[in-house]
Amino acid sequence: MKKQSIFCIIFLVLIATSLCAEVFNDNLSSNDRKRVANGELVIRNIGKAKNISLKPVNETAKNVIEIIEELDPAYLAEVIQVLPYEGNEDLIESLKPMLLDVQSYVGIPYYSERVEKYYDLYSSAKIKSVEEKYNVTKMNVILEMEPFGEIDTNILLRENKDNIFYEMTNLNKLKYYDKFTCAKEEKMKSIITAFRNEDTIVLYGIGGVDAPSIFFLRDRVETSFMNRIKTFCSYFFAKL
């Protein structure tokens, strides 16, 4: 019985690894592939669009890759998790209300490495407008995030039974403590998508900022942007 259980586990891992190879390219290391195959959450600082691990396996994935390539960010991170479809049949549907509940963004816990303390990722969230048509929702919201202040934000969400696509884009300039411009309009994006791939559901988040490199602020700005983007994406995956 023990041998059968071991063979069953090995077989399932091999299947998961094979499915990972269909969705992710060689930018994903063998160690990260094993973690993804085991259902673990993988978070990567990848720097440039050329380091994206997602393959254009469907229209949603193609769209994600094209958006990030066009953004051509200076700072970029991706969050990956693959779960079995069985037992998670309602996962894609359950993501929609969570992503559109912008008021709940205020309660997302963010850990500041610099001061070693937890804060709310966003200190306030105000909805300016909502437009819903068929399977598409568009929102304009004001999100307040230190040290960048108020961020005029567009949110786009598209969904159907097999995939969901969420994109967040800044509409105003972002300034570091109201002094240095860190990102111009539409130069910071966070994307979350989930789609079915045979017997699995692929959860993929990516966020990037096309920000100038200010030598005396680079490390601090990179940490501020990247940690917040990774916190945002991984928060929703962890809730599923």
Image: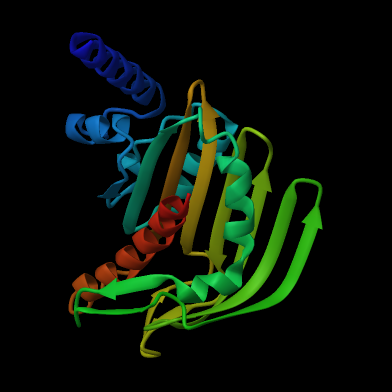
Q: Toward the viewer: 79 or 223? A: 79
Which residue is painted at 58% across and 58% down in the image? 98
Q: Toward the viewer: 228 or 217? A: 228
Extreme residue toward the right, this view: 133
Q: Residue 64: x percent and y percent?
A: 51, 43
Which residue is painted at 25% across and 15% down in the image? 5
Q: Residue 176: x percent and y percent?
A: 35, 83
Tell me, yes or no, if residue 153 can be seen here: no
In the displayed structure, would residue 226 be above or below residue 85?
below
Which residue is painted at 52% across and 44% down in the image? 193
Horizontally, residue 13 falls left or right of residue 59, namely left
Q: Residue 221: x percent and y percent?
A: 28, 73
Indicate the quadrant where residue 115 lies.
bottom left
Q: Residue 31: x percent and y percent?
A: 18, 33
Which residue is painted at 47% across and 56% down in the image? 236
In the displayed structure, would residue 69 be above or below residue 173?
above
Tell me, yes or no, if residue 73 can be seen here: yes
In the displayed structure, would residue 174 be above or below residue 179?
above
Query: What colouring style does the render use?
Result: rainbow
Extreme residue toward the bottom, this view: 178
